[in-house]
Image (cartoon, helix red, strand yellow):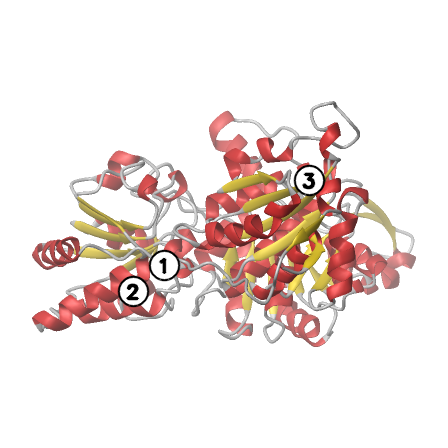
Amino acid sequence: MPKMNSMEAAVRILESEGVKNIFGIPGAGILPFYRALMDLGTIKHMVTRHEESAIHMADGYARAIGAVGVCAATSGPGASNFVTGLYTAQVDSIPILAITGQNVRSQLGREAFQAVDIAEIVKPVTKRAYCVKEGGLVPWVFREAFKIMKEGRPGPVLIDLPLDVQKEMIEYDPETDVPLPILHTPPNRKQVVKALDMILEAEAPVMLLGGGVILADACDEFRAVAEALQIPVVASYMGKSGMPWNHPLMAGQVGIQCNTPSGNKVFLDSTLVFAVGARFNDRHTGDINVYKGNRKFIHVDVDPGQLGKNITPDLGICADAKLTLQALLEEIEQRKIKPRPVGLKIPQIRTELERKTDYDDIPIKPQRVFKEINEFFDEETVFVTCIGLNQIWSGQLQKITKPRHYLDCGGAGPLGWDMPASIGAKIARPDKQVVTVVGDFGFQFCMDALPVAVMYKVPFLIVVLNNGYLGLIRQAEKYMYEMEYEVQICYDCYQECTYEELPKLAEGGTSSAVGSLEPGEVAYIPENEGRGFNFVKFAEACGAAGERVVDPSEIKAALKRGVDAGIPYVIDIILEKDTDCSMGVSIDAIREFE
């Protein structure tokens, strides 16, 4: 059998498993792996400025095309900076392979330099974590990792590689080694028959599209079942994009934050819920007793640990979503079932309950931003967003037509995820326009990703909703604790301005706040325009470009300039600073704001 370095074998396996891109930072503890990566030369690598950004890039890459995302880091703090990204991937079922360097085996457990036991640290937030202590095991660990990441409920795996293991010569023949088979669990036919019987007997059934439908590439089958039976559809937030927003059966999203009024209404009027690939998490259900009501539940999930965890179903089906929906379609066809009238005019309900977005106010209302986004971008655009009021408004107001064209982290909600995830998405889908919708606070968490995008010439558009606040926490403090404490992030908010300085201010887009200033007079630019951190200047310092927008009528033109720029482009939109976002504690008691 041929002999080769263990890391050459590892990189050859990555290649054979279809890996085309790796995001990471080389360090002393991982250099043999990087040498093998360089020598083979078939896998592209992007050097990031922080390991957390690297794993979020791998995450965005994976979500955009349904592939495994790969990231690499050195030992110690390099490896531990992956923890947040692994947790994010684990809770959202994203297959990510995190490869980390480690000190030599003889130094493990001795508090040696950068010798943290990362495999033990990340066990709760991965499907599997290895510390490989024998070079001969390297090929089999890498092969098994891909099987584990893809099989059943997808998720992340970490492989920790001691430095001396990385240098070992091992016996390995790449000509005879192939990927391990991935098993997809089929449903039991009796369960499929019973599910269909329950749906047909229900007075007002509804289908719930969870994120697992998208992950299983089962959106076509899901829609086919809904159309065959003419059943209204609602989605969880993670299921957004799984069915076109304007489909005649698509009512909207259910939830206490990222909801639509029409989605909540149709769900509340239902008597049976056929849920596929949903976790029934707290931001989706809200008050669990209101959510359950007197409804019956059929729950399809590939992970048996999800069945009964938050909702005890009347029928639980532990199986692959795509195979289950295909079996249900076969049963419908076999019985020659004719669709019954829906009874509900879903498009009319959507229109009647749609939230207002056509505000002309200055400072700009956040809802108006999404009106402009919906009108300007086509259905091929890939949107990325993350935790905050920006995410909730996006979830409530953006109109998405295609699966994997709306990427969001729903379970962990790590601030800063969106910018690096957008870069990963653009690397995965270079043919798509990628747009990040980010808050002014979240932007500053992983802004180290912007110079990476400039360096590698990765163009994407960053829309900053700038209200000068930790907006979501400001609102929580206001209504739950009757305070406003340490949530304002604008500074130097009032700038002295003289008549002579007006031309300069006009260039920066801030003169509208000065009004009719006369020669010799002094005025102050108020908070709505003096927002402290200058996102545009930061973009320019990185080699990107951008502009500030203070008038809603200028948003579309700014979006056009951003798309046409061909480089990373930041649009800093100055919002009304204290607009509240519609939400509540239960799906029947959402407090609406304008």
| 164 relative to 536, above or below | above
Q: Secondary structure at mark 1?
A: helix
Drawn side of residue 529 relative to residue 476, left or right: right
The Cα–Cα distance between marks 2 and 3, rounded to whole angstroms, is: 39 Å
Q: Residue at x 57, y 43 (%)?
A: 86
Q: Residue at x 45, y 51 (%)?
A: 154
Q: Secondary structure at mark 3?
A: helix
Residue 459 x %, y %: 70, 69
Residue 336 x %, y %: 9, 73
Which of the marked residues, 3 or 1, is nearer the chain's N terminus?
A: 3
- The residue under label 3 is which amino acid type? Ala
- The residue under label 2 is which amino acid type? Phe
Residue denoted by label 1: 213
The Cα–Cα distance between marks 2 and 1, rounded to whole angstroms, is: 8 Å
Which of the marked residues, 2 or 1, is nearer the chain's N terminus?
A: 1
Quadrant containing the N terminus in the rendered view: bottom right
Q: Residue furthest front?
A: 1
Residue denoted by label 2: 222
Viewer-proximal residue, 405 or 75?
A: 75
Query: Which of the 4 image quadrants contains residue 333?
Result: bottom left
Viewer-proximal residue, 323 or 245?
A: 323
Q: Residues within 10 Å of mark 3 (few under 14, many from 20)?
A: many
Which of the marked residues, 2 or 3, is nearer the chain's N terminus?
A: 3
Query: Which of the 4 image quadrants contains residue 587?
Result: top left
Residue denoted by label 3: 79
- The residue under label 1 is which amino acid type? Val
Q: Which numbered mark, 2 or 3, is in the foreground of this view?
A: 3
Do callouts 2 and 1 mark residues in contact (Cβ within 8 Å)? yes
Query: Which of the 4 image quadrants contains residue 69?
Result: bottom right
